Image (spheres, grey):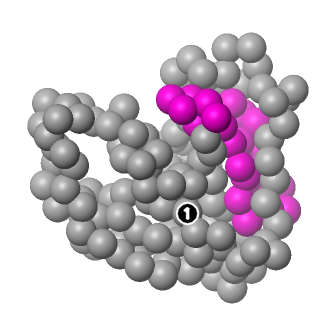
Amino acid sequence: MVVYRIVKQKNRTTDLSGTGAHREGGRWNNTGTYAVYTSESRSLAALELLVHLDEPEAPPGLFIMSIEINNRAAIYEIPDTDLPQDWRSPENSALKNMGDKFLADIKYVAIKVRSAIMPFEYNYILNPLYQKFHNEVKIVNVETYSLDERLL
């Protein structure tokens, strides 16, 4: 399986450490938990980038990372029945705590979660602390990317 991640700096195109999420937190993790956010398609990765842009214009120097996950890797899909009713709301502490729990258990290389902005598509939250992470996850391609200004 291949998942995608868009980063804003060339030096981050080799980084799957999860330190950004550790430092800032995210929808599925609190500050202090390592995680790498990826999407099932390039277009979903672009939408996920768009909702997090603070600038009124596209940042220069974007890169799309293609990341391969071994097809036999342990991935946990969060069942819809486990999602809180307001799961799409920003800064949902229940989602952060749920993600922290799965990431701390270190049983899965990733968790498959619905995208809040495209609920019928999925993001994959990679767990860089998973014991076999570097055997089951690898960057297979990096491409430069320019966000179409019409999206802004």
Farthest residue in the top direction? 85
For the N terminus, which image quadrant?
A: bottom right
Farthest residue in the bottom direction? 135
Image vertical order of residue 51 relative to residue 103, above or below: above
Query: Is residue 30 toward the left or the right of residue 133 in the image?
Result: left
Label count reads 1
For the C terminus, which image quadrant?
A: top left
Image vertical order of residue 101 relative to residue 117, above or below: below
Residue at left 82%, top 75%? 72
Q: Could you say where residue 95 lies in the image, as x and y percent from the top left?
A: 69, 30
Q: Could you say where residue 5 lies in the image, as x and y percent from the top left?
A: 44, 59
The kind of residue on which mark 1 rests is: Val
Q: Which of 12 and 67 lies nearest the eye of the viewer?
A: 67
Let me know if residue 114 is in the magenta part: yes
Query: Is residue 14 toward the left or the right of residue 88 in the image?
Result: left
Per the rendered image, the range of residues in magenta is: 95-120
Q: Could you say where residue 126 lies in the image, as x and y percent from the top left?
A: 63, 60
Let me know if residue 131 is in the magenta part: no
Image vertical order of residue 109 relative to residue 36, above or below: below
Residue assigned mark 1: 3
Residue at left 35%, top 75%? 142
Q: Could you say where residue 15 lies in the image, as x and y percent from the top left?
A: 43, 71
